[in-house]
Amino acid sequence: MNIGIIGQGFVGNAVYQKFKNFFKVYTYDIAAKLCNSSYDELINNCKIIFICGS
């Protein structure tokens, strides 16, 4: 299963660290250096998406 995380701050990174060993995790953030996928790739490939932002 693919999981997406939008926002890679404190909470988003904690979610990523928890799931990265069990699932393919796509990440997207306004800061490009924190992303491992594009927004479209994340939306089109993930069944579950966490939105972690303020």
Image: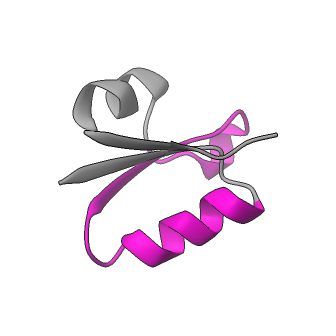
Work out which residue is located at the far left of the displayed protein and give it. 1
Q: Residue at x 61, y 71 (%)?
A: 14
Q: Residue at x 43, y 39 (%)?
A: 37
* Vertical side of 20 occupied by 37: above or below: above
Callout count: 0
Q: Residue at x 65, y 44 (%)?
A: 7
State yes or no: residue 6 in magenta.
Answer: no
Work out which residue is located at the far right of the displayed protein and give it. 54
* Percent x, y of residue 52: 65, 46
Quarter of the image for the N terminus: give it: bottom left
Question: Residue 49 sits in which quadrant?
Answer: top left
Question: Residue 24 sits in which quadrant?
Answer: bottom left
Left-right relation of 41 to 12: left
* Percent x, y of residue 2: 24, 50
Question: Residue 22 sits in which quadrant?
Answer: bottom left
Q: Which residues are magenta?
A: 10-36
Q: What's the colour scheme?
A: one colour
Is 6 or 30 nearer to us in this picture?
6
Left-right relation of 11 to 40: right
Quarter of the image for the C terminus: give it: top right
Is 40 or 19 nearer to us in this picture?
19
Left-right relation of 40 to 13: left
* Percent x, y of residue 4: 41, 45
* Percent x, y of residue 38: 45, 30
Q: Residue at x 55, y 45 (%)?
A: 35
